[in-house]
Amino acid sequence: MTFGIFLLNFSGSQITMRHRAALSEALNQTNQGDLWRTLRLMLGFTVVMELTGTMLLASLWVPQMGWSSGLYYSFFHAVSAFNNAGFGLAADSLTGYVGNPLVNSVISMLFILGGLGFIVVADMLNKRRFQEYALHTKVMLIATVVINAVAMLAILMLEHGNPNTLGALNEPSDKLWAAWFQAVVPRTAGFNTVDIAALYPSTAFLMMGLMFIGGGSGSTASGIKLSTFVILLLATRTFLRQQERPVIFGRSLSARIVTKALATTIISLFCVISGTFLLAMIEPGDFLNLAFEAVSAFGTVGMSRGVTANLSAAGQVIIMVLMLIGRVGPLTFAFLIANRPGERIRYPDGQISVG
């Protein structure tokens, strides 16, 4: 969508108000001046981060592979990481660098920054103090730190004794790097430094949850988005405390925001459940592996437990449709629902038993 707006602008074509409204909604901007400023920042920040990642990775891979292959290898992985694509040039992704601090830190920082969302990055560049950040920026930063730390500790505990993953690593530092990388990568990055098919079922299920949550709004990541997950948690806490509205950082959230988060999540769950059901119906194999495949496709993560190549043509179509819906569908549906014309008729309140 952003690229299309740039093409229209450079060609001199007029951008309709509907297109401006859609882009402003996706980037959380209130006026056209802020919108164009954000678009320029998105382009500049992307170029800077990908070139920086290329230079850092080149310091390792150029001495190993030579200038031509080393630079190409570095640039490919920097672009793939920042854009949360997860494609690697090696058949085993990055498993050969499971304990390498440079590869683990650079690749993970690239896809974390790409997954935060450009509106968060723009806010951080324009302001210096945490107290001055917008509410969305505060929520994303805190939630990203918390979910990454919790996921890392969980994977470290679950896989510590697995002889095919963390248990096969002798150095404690290698175990920590592997746990860190696999904790942050499911939120749509797609790389791996351990064999995903060898993970315990409990770890695979945890990673399915992380893949479903995804990254930040207006980012290169997919999933329902981390901010949506936080809103659902806040809404649940509000109900349990018998409060009227969710409150965070001294700000209350409107019913419109909660409804949009709920609609996005329900649509996403419906797509994942439907895709998993269809795969289980037409494909042989372990149910967990098929469900993992469906969630990974919807979150556009790209990780697999080894069944992708064995899917039939119909199964591949299901995976492709899930990837397309995951990248475009939930946000589009939520946007349409949240921006429908107001109701002209107010109906009497009704009661339906819940719980």
Image (spheres, rainbow, N blue to C red):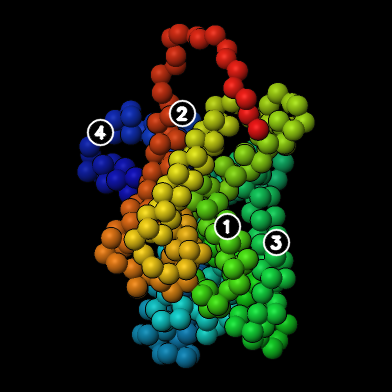
Q: Which of marks 3 and 4 is nearer the N terminus?
A: 4
Residue indicated by mark 4: 14
Residue indicated by mark 1: 210
Out of 209 and 187, give the one closest to the viewer: 209
At 33% across and 68% down in the image, what residue appears? 311
Q: Earlier in the sequence, mark 4 or mark 1?
A: 4
Q: Residue 155 location in percent, x, y? A: 66, 68
Point out the image quarter for the N terminus.
top left
Q: Earlier in the sequence, mark 3 or mark 2?
A: 3
Q: Can the viewer see residue 80 in this picture?
A: no
What's under tag 2, amino acid-wise?
Ala
Q: Residue 335 location in percent, x, y? A: 43, 34
Residue indicated by mark 2: 338
Q: Which mark is residue 52?
A: none
What's under tag 3, amino acid-wise?
Ala
| Label 3–label 4 contact, CB within 8 A | no
| Label 4–label 1 contact, CB within 8 A | no
What's under tag 4, amino acid-wise?
Gln
